[in-house]
Image (cartoon, helix red, strand yellow):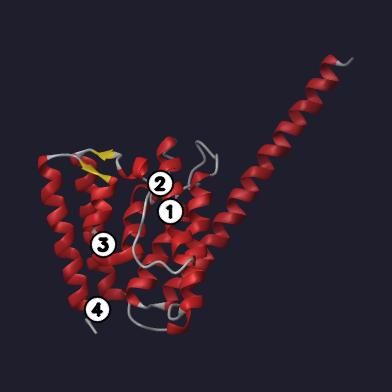
Amino acid sequence: MTSTPHRHQQLIDTLREAIEQSETRPLTVGEVVGNLQGGGLSLVSLVLTLPFLQPLSLGPVSIIGGSALTMLGWQMVQGRTQPWLPAKMASLDLSPRVGRVLLQTCTKLLTMTGRIAKPRLTGWVRGRNARRFAGAIVAAGGLLIVAPFPGIPFSNSLPALAVAMVAIAEMEEDGLFMVGAVVALIASIVYLGAVGFAAFELLRRLYEWGAGLFGG
């Protein structure tokens, strides 16, 4: 079995090759996924979360990225080991700058997590049921990224963090990161639920105020 450091180096080398390609022409989402086939669904999920690991919502990009993550999570639940995306989504172009930033960030993240993550609490990450559980978190995180919360800080970053932690847990066989993913997902649901409830209450009170004002 390939050791984790060796596997990490292979993935980092693959990412560097993709970065070189992105310097000469735009890469499509499908090409990025193809370049990362050796990392499987986990690494592809990690790359797709990178744009969302910042406080601001990205509008239409959130719909595309979140939908892709939802599909990848569902594929994990079904037991697939390699990713598949619809042709229309796979054909989307990434500018050289965007492709370079994404892949460079992922390379740095892989290098960093290789130093702090290690096999532990492996019951959380080994076996068919553990993989299905991981896929469910990825799919749920993708759906939360798609959810319409424009302009709400952290509405994308919290579920993206959950997905990123699942990917790291899977690649490193580190169950502690999977526990962190569960915490991040619950925090996302609570936060977005609170925002949604507050928005509903505000609209309800505005409606009552308007009805009282114009109803006499």
- N-term mark: 1 or 3: 3
- N-term mark: 2 or 4: 4
Q: Which residue is mark 2?
A: 65
The quarter of the picture where the C terminus appears is top right
Q: Left or right of 109: which side holds 140?
A: right
Secondary structure beneath disc 3? helix
Viewer-proximal residue, 215 or 102? 102
Spatial CA span between label 3 and label 4: 17 Å
Q: Which residue is mark 3?
A: 37
Q: Looking at the picture, which amino acid does disc 2 mark? A: Gly
Secondary structure beneath disc 2? helix
Spatial CA span between label 1 and label 3: 16 Å
Secondary structure beneath disc 1? helix
The residue most toward the front is: 87
Q: Looking at the picture, which amino acid does disc 1 mark? A: Leu
Residue at horizontal 38%, vertical 51%? 53
How crowded is the residue under tag 3: few (<14 C-alpha within 10 Å), some, or many (20+)?
some
Viewer-proximal residue, 100 or 31? 31
Q: Which residue is mark 1?
A: 69
Residue 31 seen in render = yes
- N-term mark: 2 or 3: 3
Q: Which residue is mark 4?
A: 4
Image coordinates for residue 116, horizontal then vertical, percent: 30, 75
Image coordinates for residue 212, horizontal then vertical, percent: 85, 21
Residue at horizontal 38%, vertical 72%? 170
Relative vertical location of residue 167 with respect to residue 198 in this rendering, above or below: below
How crowded is the residue under tag 2: few (<14 C-alpha within 10 Å), some, or many (20+)?
many
Residue 133 disc label: none
Q: Looking at the picture, which amino acid does disc 4 mark? A: Thr
Decide: marks 1, 2 in contact (CB < 8 A)? yes
